[in-house]
Amino acid sequence: MGNKQTVFTHEQLEEYQVGVMSGALTGLFYRYQDLAPQLVPLDYTSCPDVKVPYELIGTMPELKDNPFRLRIAQVFSEDGDGHMTLNNFLDMFSVMSEMAPRDLKAYYAFKIYGVCRAGDFNNDDYICMWDLEQTVTKLTRGELSAEEVSLVCEKVLDEADGDHDGRLSLEDFQNMILRAPDFLR
Amino acid sequence: MSHQRQGRGEEAGGGARGRSRSGSPGTGDNSGRRPSRKPALKAESVTGRCGGPAGQKGAKGSPRPDSPQRKQVEHRRHREELGKPKRSTAQRTREGRKKKKDGKASLKEQRASPKKEKEVPKKEMWKQLKKHRSPSLASSASARESLSEEELARILEQVEEKKKLITHMRNKPWPMAKKLTELREAQEFVEKYEGALGKGKGKRLYAYRMLMTKKWIKFKRDFDNFKNQCIPWEMKIKDIESHFGSSVASYFIFLRWMYGVNLVLFGLIFGLVIIPEVLMGMPYGSIPRKTVPRAEEERAMDFSVLWDFEGYIKYSALFYGYYNDQRTIGWLRYRLPMAYFMVGVSVFGYSLMIVIRSMASNTQGSTSEGESDNFTFSFKMFTSWDYLIGNSETADNKYVSITTSFKESIVDEQESNKEENIHLTRFLRVLANFLIICCLCGSGYLIYFVVKRSQEFSKMQNVSWYERNEVEIVMSLLGMFCPPLFETIAALENYHPRIGLKWQLGRIFALFLGNLYTFLLALMDDVHLKLSNEEKIKNITHWTLFNYYNSSGWNESVPRPPLHPADVPRGSCWETAVGIEFVRLTVSDMLVTYITILVGDFLRACFVRFMNYCWCWDLEAGFPSYAEFDISGNVLGLIFNQGMIWMGSFYAPGLVGINVLRLLTSMYFQCWAVMSSNVPHERVFKASRSNNFYMGLLLLVLFLSLLPVAYTIMSLPPSFDCGPFSGKNRMYDVIQETVENDFPTFLGKIFAFIANPGLIIPAILLMFLAIYYLNSVSKTLSRANAQLRKKIQALREVEKSHKSVKGRAAARDSEDTAKGSSKNATKAETMPHSASQSQTLGKKAQGPGTSRSASGTMLPASSHLPISRPPGIRPDPGHAGPQTHPGRAASRKSAQRPPH
């Protein structure tokens, strides 16, 4: 059991525990380490800069059947390429855990569904028509015809777009999703 | 180790709520710190509003000279983040104006009032603090006398604030690295100053609470899972629903519901009638009614006889005739006839109650979910994927089901948007209804005619096979050809498939009523015939017994052994005959259904599937194709079968047992058949959320089946030699008997009084009045409800148009200021951040920012100066979200409504 103590220093543990659920940290670390045993060292006391590539992240049982796995990995990774450091990994789990509050989940859900950037200097994200189409196609695996997809997307915009600018802002999205009966229950 | 990924883990919201209630970790000594809690909360919300990171970085630049740099930086930053409660009044008012400009007047007022309150009693608070926590504080305070009291109070606040930050760290949408640095800073700060203010000892309590909430959530989730697993066939039905849509699934849900009801009826009848009879009643062969008569004895065990429910089955506890009329049986002195009667009544009572109750609860369910209609597609798109799925097969099913549900909604949508020639549609609908009424009338007359003829035939001798079975043949031909005909005619009407299904159900129901009518008519004729023969048989029995005992040629000294029960002549026992008829009908119905499924669906599917390789045309796409699941036929079959059960269960207590078996097998069999050999409907449509239409039909059938049973019980005399009521004038006499013999006399009097028509009629009148009153009340309420919903809808529309107008204005604005703001943004990136700079930046950024936040007037909480935020720092627009506490959430909601 000496192994466990060498992974993190005591302070590191304490700190992480505030960020992640207490107690789950070591478990998560071993999961992370299991993904790429040859990449991730067992000693994290010196905070090595290691990234696990998306190809490995995507094979986790929790993610492998998820149509949005690429987006999830991209959102949580530092530079949007899906490769994750341990911190990103912990982030992902803390957001996805059942203890995370609704608003946090809504925020990240927004990130996951929306790819578009409105402008280059504006860091605000939107969910635009293209995102919606992508989402529908992913959800139905392309079973719907093009007209049906566009009908669905138009309806979504019609329903949730509060300011009629043809895209969903975070506001619109939160406004909508926090009322959803299925979201987080 | 709960590393399950949970996009929608259950009730995390509850956890968060609990957390925010439990407050800061230092709440161990509440009394002293309570005053500081409010500002802390407030401070957080303000932090959220003005974008934490930007403010932070900006503040760092200007340290104060009179104290250690780091500490003061912290100080200042925090004071600024705290919504500047300690600024001079002038500053405050200016700020207030700014806020007003932002259109947050209401919010500001809310916030401002506690601020002022706070300002004044600051000193007092400190004194209070001293008083309350004197032992630990006095010493530390004396140690730090260099700090003024006000300073200390401020530090205290900040410590609280930091602690709050630490505890809420997990809820912020920051990347882990940022969380870590923030955390480190906060912890250092707390460590540094907590010594001055005493240790927070609420930490352990807090940790314990957290643990408990976690456990509780986990437990609740497990419990929910367990509950789900306890629902029988849930997985099967979900599977079917995912492939065939909710309309087909609604049949199976109905079937399951029916199974549940029948299980209860089965328990009632078996527990209270059959088992007591088997355990405590007289054994088989002891009396004539419990013995197979001599003439039938030889063939009584043949399969062909048993198959017709004759022979040994007829003389068993499954049928009415087997029961004895002894008032009490066994050592328990169980009053079987009484129990038999009461169970017969309560079968109907329970069925009525359960049907009506489920109808009521269905209506409630359908009215309460008004709001989610606004976001049908959005919810489908964003919340339909279950992030807990970790199995590829389940994932496949989920894909299919999501596709199906999208298709359902699309059909609904298309249907509501359809624009067509309304006159033509109306004309076609009237025409279709006219045609169908003609069909129904024609078939009704045909049935009537055939029944009349069959009555004539029954009087004649040597009728041919066709003439004997004419009624059945005509009925089954009608049943075979009318539904498709109706469907063809219904195609004229061009209804939404859901409404079309209802019409179809109603029409076939009307047709089947004819079926029921002929069946009951034939049965009644039979019963009356048997009743008229009864007197004759009664005399014969008497005479036989009399002759047997008095006949000569037997040794007078030895008493004669009683006549063997099998030899006693007996009546035809019309009750058992009726019971057998119902049982036969049920069983043959079941077999026909199964064979139809096997031949019509399964063999057809096999044929289409395998002969397609060597056939001249495409079988799958062309003529025979695969079968669709016939919802209307199956539902009606189920409903009418249940009617048979209700009618028959009084005379054949075992019928319910048979029905339970039937429902059980048909659940599995039909599930298999649907999945293996049917294809989804061409237009998958969504079943109405409440299957009240099925329930309504069921209620009608229940009522119809109640009538003949009540008629036979109330107005026909029971057979003289079989059944629990033999020897009585009417079946309900058993109640009177029990009341007279077993209850004290005053109770009997009360019963007699209650049964007085003088009391019953007013009671009924009263009930009618109550019904009328409640009905009118509910109508008013529902009207009010509809009006409110309309109002909400209108508000939404107004809100939308409002927003769109502003949005357009904002777009124009931002175009104008785009250049300026981009300049600002670059400045923000490159320049060293100082407090003043950040302030000016903030103001400038307000330019384009206000226009946007004005467009988002409804949600002041998330107007976060989106443009001016220096890139590189993670934007956290959701910042405000996680920290909202209930009060704020409420205020946000109220702010959402535009003022008009």
Image (cartoon, coloured by chain):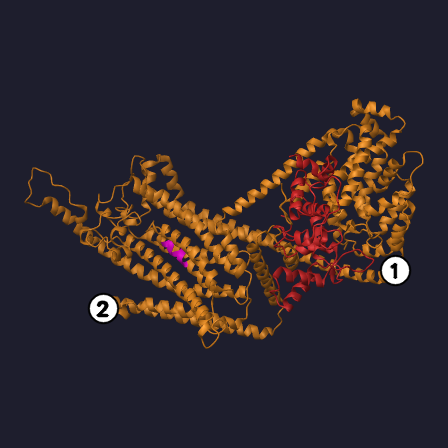
**Residue A116 counted in the magenta span:** no
Residue type indicated by callout 2: Met
Compare marks 2 and 1 and give the one earlier in the sequence. Answer: 2
**Residue B646 counted in the magenta span:** yes
The chain under label 2 reads: B
Does residue B818 sit above or below A100 in this rendering?
below
- Give the percent coordinates (x, y) of residue A19: 72, 41
Magenta residues span: B640-647
Chain coloured orange here: B
Residue type indicated by callout 1: Thr
Dot 1: element: helix
What type of secondary structure mainly makes up the magenta span? helix
Quarter holding residue B286: top left
Numbered mark located on residue B460 in the image: 2
Does residue B594 sit above or below B485 in this rendering?
above
The chain under label 1 reads: B
User: Mark 1 — residue?
Assistant: B817
- Tell me: B252 left or right of B554: right
Does residue B347 sit above or below B68 in this rendering?
below
Q: Mark 1 Cα within 10 Å, few/some/many (few <14, many 20+)?
A: some
Nearest-to-viewer mark from 2 and 1: 1
Q: Mark 2 Cα within 10 Å, few/some/many (few <14, many 20+)?
A: few
